[in-house]
Image (cartoon, helix red, strand yellow):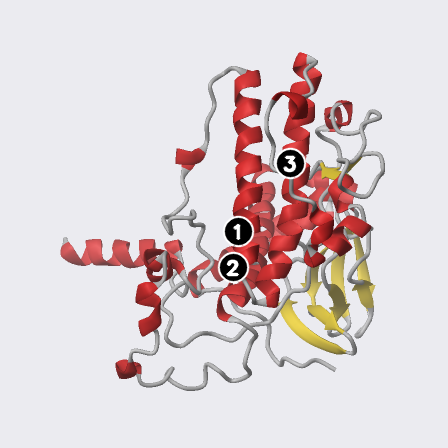
Amino acid sequence: MLDSPSPLQPSAARADHVFPTLTAAQLARIAAHGKRRTVQAGEILIEAGDHVVPFFVVTAGALEVVRMSGESETLVALHGPGQFNGEVNMISGRRALFRLRARDTSEVVALDRDEMLSLFQNDAELSEILMRAFILRRVELVSNGVAMLNNGPDVPDADATDGGDIAGAQMEMMKDVRNAAGFYSHAGGAVPADSNGLSWNKDFITTTGNVVFDLLHNFHLECGARLHKLRVYETLSDPTGREVCGYLLVRGSVHAHAYALALKNLTGVEIEKMLPTPNIPLGNIPECQKYLDEGAHRRLYTFSPDDYKEMAGIWGNGEVALPDDPPGELMVVDGMPEGGKIQQLTGVPSAFTPDYAPEEMFEIATKLYKASR
């Protein structure tokens, strides 16, 4: 039984890009790459966790995207005629995040992954529409996770009121935090910001054209980042924050190790014998333990089903885990790591962001400009 009677709704201006409706001509071009079929009401077309994830375009009826949590279900999206399922996992070949089920007896065009990739390669217009939708759907999912971390667990009907009387200065304590500017500008919203609370830009990217120097620079950055994560961990009591730090400490160790091995491969020098490196025994941190037990410290992901195979010449190839970590040979994994649980959130009445999308601001500015002429 569905817990939520209505699907997730992105901002009005973005909705047409997140859940576009294709024209009859576009549907016909897709049908040339796939097969038409009838699906029955309640039929499950994709199960969460499936490796083989077909691409479906609805021509009649409706398909519902459902998030499973135990025995309960939450409606994430509803695809009607001219609409389609999928997000970036479909391109990368990763497992499905959600269940896809026919709400009614419906007509669909079905494409397997190879047929869909062929469509991407041969139809520029449809490729742009589908890729933009896939990317924006992932952005909505990431934004959901960021909002969950910033605002805490969801409270049903929390957006039913106006947010309360703000005259009492409920957030007065925030003026004394070290990064008050970051809180004022970005807290509660999914905004990419640096550790100074400023919108992230390319200022922290260094490239000299000398691959050895650049690898050494990035090695030091990763070592410094591991110390920063450890300091954040040591200041936190919140279990969610400590869990995030535990995971990032393990994965940060992978990144530093990878740069060191790349330098070793290029120069023949064992970097750990030449330079001081932070000694952070991850086994002493409880939140790291389960990630070490499952071998997350030995896996480097390609984030692609076909590209970056050369990584195996550095990561793997007889190389093993760091001495303080559980033993085992390093491995390259095609694709991406598994995703986490997707939370369903209500709005925050007192928060302005991220209600207005850039597309809406552009539309408003265009109308204002026309009115000024």
Q: Nearer the viewer, residue 324 or 13?
A: 324
Q: Quadrant of residue 124?
A: top right
Mark 2–mark 1 Cα distance, whole angstroms, equals 6 Å
Looking at the rendered structure, the kind of residue marked 2 is Thr
Q: Secondary structure at mark 1?
A: helix
The residue tagged 3 is 255
> Position of 362 compared to 207: left or right?
left
Indicate the position of residue 116 as horizontal and vertical percent values: 72, 44
Q: Residue at x 14, y 56 (%)?
A: 372
Question: Which one is earlier in the sequence, the residue at label 1 or at label 3?
Answer: 1
Residue at mark 1: 231
Q: Residue furthest left?
A: 373
The residue drawn where x is 80% and y is 74% is 42
Inter-mark Cα distance, 1 to 3: 18 Å
Question: Looking at the rendering, which quadrant does residue 315 occupy?
Answer: top right
Q: Residue at x 66, y 52 (%)?
A: 247
Q: Which residue is mark 2?
A: 235
Q: Nearer the viewer, residue 297 or 59?
A: 297
Whole-percent x, y for residue 283 in the image: 74, 50
Disc 1 or disc 3, which is closer to the eye?
1
x and y, in percent, of residue 180 in the image: 33, 60
Marker disc for residue 124 = none
Relative to the observer, which residue lies in front, 290 or 146? 290
How would you rate the neighbour count of disc 3 (Cα within 10 Å): few for under 14, some for 14-19, many for 20 or more? many
Q: Is residue 277 visible?
A: yes
Q: Is residue 214 left or right of residue 256?
A: left
Q: Is residue 269 above or below residue 261?
A: above
Residues at circles 2 and 1 in contact by the CB criterion of under 8 Å: yes
Lateral position of residue 316 relative to residue 60, left or right: right
In the image, is 335 to the left or to the right of 142?
Answer: right
